[in-house]
Amino acid sequence: MPTTTSPSAPATTVEHELVITRRFAAPRRRVFEAWTDPQQAKAWWGPRDYPLTYLEMDARPGGSWRGRLTSRETGEELWQSGVTRELHAPDRLVFTFAWDGDNAGEPGHETLVTVTLEEDGAGTLMTFRQTPFDTAEDRDGHRGGWSSSFDRLDEHLAKALRKESGMLGDKKAIATVAVRDLAAAKRFYEDKLGLEPAGDKGHGVINYRTGGTTMVVYVSQFAGTNQATTVTWSVGGDFDDILRSLQSKGVSFEHYDGLPEVTREGDVHRADGLKLAWFKDPDGNIHHLIST
């Protein structure tokens, strides 16, 4: 891509310059695209507690950009903007950066950001510079924000590489439960657990809706042979209500005394501040309730 020359920056001191060096386990091309592709930038730009929620970006020399950070806790909005000065794929990006000033939409103090990317084995070494800051306090505030952003960038790149390589990290897992008597299992899962069928696939298989995913119940001669937990239900603050409801429907709970650092009161086990309970379906498959 074409390169333009940035005007010389004013002389700065260490106090007025922010420098952050990070290594990413991703090719340089991917890191450069994460900076210059608006859809990717929206996935990581901004600290965890103030993520980017709006972005317009004209990623070419002379093109402008404008973004909005939004507080996860309060909803406060912080606007920032700038102009791209240099864009040289895949190793250099230079742009101006300014928060909105006191007059809405008008930029405040302007700094210059320079991002250089070097190949480092199979990864990329990024050097980030931003200057000049009015005070060391302002510089250090930006250090915290950008460092959190770069943690998110690292996660974004890792997720993209997993998806590209066909790995399973971003795929949906489906619980699969083996039973011998499908009719008995159907009564248990629907009448006692309150699950709704997502479709009877026939041939001894039923899909059930479970939150954001599904659970498959199928007929197998090996049903009931698993002595470990088959399904874990993460029920959060509904733990007590669900436990009482299951008890009222005749579900019997298992007691596992002697587990390390686990105590028990009635059907409820406790460990690390969590509530735990276990029960079995008609085929002996072990289900686990946990208050997370």
Image: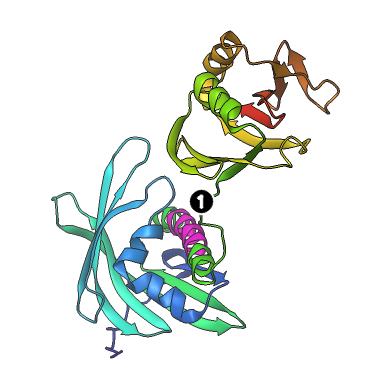
Q: Is residue 94 left or right of residue 273?
A: left
Q: How many marks?
A: 1
Residue 2, how many percent across, how many down? 28, 91
Q: Which of the 4 image quadrants contains residue 149?
A: bottom left
In front of the other: 256 or 26: 256
**Against 229, is 34 above or below?**
below
Q: Position of residue 242 (x, y in %)?
A: 54, 18
> Disc 1 marks which residue?
172
Q: Quadrant of the N terminus?
A: bottom left
**Observer-nearest of 278 and 272:** 278
User: Image quadrant for the C terminus?
Assistant: top right
Instruction: State whether residue 57 appears in this view.
Output: yes
> Residue 238 location in percent, x, y?
51, 20
Q: Residue furthest bottom?
A: 2
Residue drawn at (53%, 74%) of the image: 26
The residue closer to the viewer here, 239 or 153, is 239
Residue range highlighted in magenta: 143-156
The magenta stretch spans residue 212: no
Query: In terms of image quadrants, where is residue 279?
Result: top right
Instruction: Return the x and y of residue 94 as percentages of the image width and height.
Output: 33, 77
Of all residues, the one furthest to the right in this rendering is 258
Query: Which residue in the rendered view is the most extreme toward the front?
Result: 203
Magenta region's main secondary structure? helix
Say which residue appears at 62% left-offset and 27% top-offset. 289
Instruction: Sort mark 1 into few (<14), some (14-19) or many (20+) by Cα contacts within 10 Å.
Output: few
Q: Secondary structure at mark 1?
A: loop
Viewer-side residue, 203 vs 91: 203
Q: Amino acid at mark 1?
A: Lys
Residue drawn at the location 62% of the way across and 11% of the way down: 250
Q: Is 151 included in the stretch rendered in magenta?
A: yes
